[in-house]
Amino acid sequence: MSPTELERAAGRLVGEPTLAAPPLERITERVDQRRRRRRGAFGGAVAALALVGVGALALRPDTPVPVVATGGDHATDAEASTEPSGGDVDDDAHDDLSGDHHGSDKEGGLHWFGGPVDLSVRSEPFSQEVADELAASADQTIALPDATAYVTRDGDRVMIGVVSAERILQIEAPASLFPDSSELDELIEKFGGVEGGLRFFHDGGELPLWMFDGETKFPFEQLPLEELPEELRKFMEDRELGELWGEEWKLFGEFELPPLDAPPEELEKWLEDRFGEFKLRFDDHARDETPTTST
Amino acid sequence: MVHHRSPGEFESWYRSEHPRIVASLAVTARDRDVALEVAAEAFVRAYERWDRVGAMERPGGWLHRTALNLLKRRLRRRRLEGELLSGTIVPIGVGPTEVDVDLWRAVEALPDRTRTAVALRYVADLTEPEIAKAMGVSRGTVATLLSRGRNSLGDHLASSHGLPETAHEREEQSYVPH
């Protein structure tokens, strides 16, 4: 079949009167509703959390207010009670947040788009102490079903995490992922809403690790599980992250898709221009089940 | 080159893009209702970001890429919910003119990726690089998918109607000397 024939048929299809755009108000009303809902959802979340004593307060980056840490049922969680002492875990957490371990895990790096992408992933069983520390340093937190999520900007790094009753999961990314710092501010602000999209989920044979805003994304979702680097696959399987990531936890963000069809050198330059040297790093505190002890 | 479009230009852009994106999504999703919903959501997002999207050289490319991502998310959710149509072909319901009914049924029967590429190229009128970006595949893959799609459609229509398989053959057959 010739392209011309298809174009003509498509032209007739597109010309169908039934496809005419509805009034613009349909769109603008939805935008308005969404904005109201975002504001309302965040306020509602804060109110609800204040009632149950679990959660989070709205924080703007320029108005640091201590965040009420997760507690309540979490504190009695059997798994949490077996966790390492706060001091030791805190030390680990500081190491993670500083990004000092970069470059120490070549095998664990997930190379994508022809170049390494540096987004560190930290996963460990729930620990009240770590949860407290993370929440206290958060620029923004929000309640999710059965979890609390947070975002923190610390210099040139951005930490996005989820604390559930079972596990703490954090992704750390360079702030340069967001070339415009005001955009990052906006994203942090938007974090309190329900729309937008850094998402953690796992459905069957694919690993959609995260997705930005439904518009542009790292195409991790297209990565079949069997094609994952061995370490990452084992990480997923061992931790049964499918269960943890069963929900779509929308946090925030958007991202520009790299020019996948560009020559390697052009792609590499594109990545360098935006991100510098990136790699994906896994800090698996759960790997060693023996509680860490100070020496 | 950067084109700055005013907020007022959103409406005209919205009206011109709407039929094309809905048709494209309907072909891709094989479901008109889903296409309408996804298109509306994509336009909402475009409206929210119009200062940025409107400055793009071709905001339509962004719109289709966004819509395709939304559609994929929607279909994945549907699959997870066990509502997948188990291979059943659902009429796209966009009201194709009678003369093209067989063609669009044949398009609906194409494999997912091939159908998506055909929809984006011929219905959405995206370029091959734009399709590659939207689908997250290489440009070469797009070319292959489109070629494969056209061949499949030609074969399908020829076998179902005894039509000549190539455009040249069709022109030969329809030629009436004066």
Image: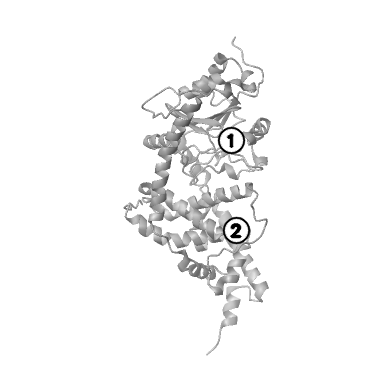
Determine the residue located farthest toward the bottom in the rendered image.
Answer: B178
Identify the element where label 1 is drawn: loop
Q: Is residue A8 above or below residue B14?
A: below
Front-most of residues B38 and A99: B38
Image point (54%, 16%), residue name? A91
Chain to which mark 1 belongs: A
Amino acid type of the residue that numbered disc 2 sits on in the rendered structure: Thr
Q: Which mark is residue B155?
A: none
Q: Which residue is mark 1?
A: A110
**Total tally of numbered discs in the picture:** 2
Determine the residue located farthest toward the front in the rendered image.
Answer: A51
Mark 1 surroundings within 10 Å by alpha-carbon count, few (fewer than 14), some (14 through 19), many (20 or more): many
Disc nearest the viewer among 1 and 2: 2
Determine the residue located farthest toward the top in the rendered image.
Answer: A295
Asked if one can make out residue B56 in the rendered structure from this viewpoint, the answer is no
Q: Is residue A255 above or below residue B116?
A: above
Q: Position of residue A65 (x, y in %)?
A: 40, 23
Identify the element where label 2 is drawn: helix
Q: Quadrant of the C terminus of chain A?
A: top right
Front-most of residues B178 and A203: A203
Q: Position of residue A39 (x, y in %)?
A: 40, 38
State how far apart marks 1 and 2 are (Cα): 29 Å
Q: Which residue is mark 2?
A: B114
Mark 2 surroundings within 10 Å by alpha-carbon count, few (fewer than 14), some (14 through 19), many (20 or more): many
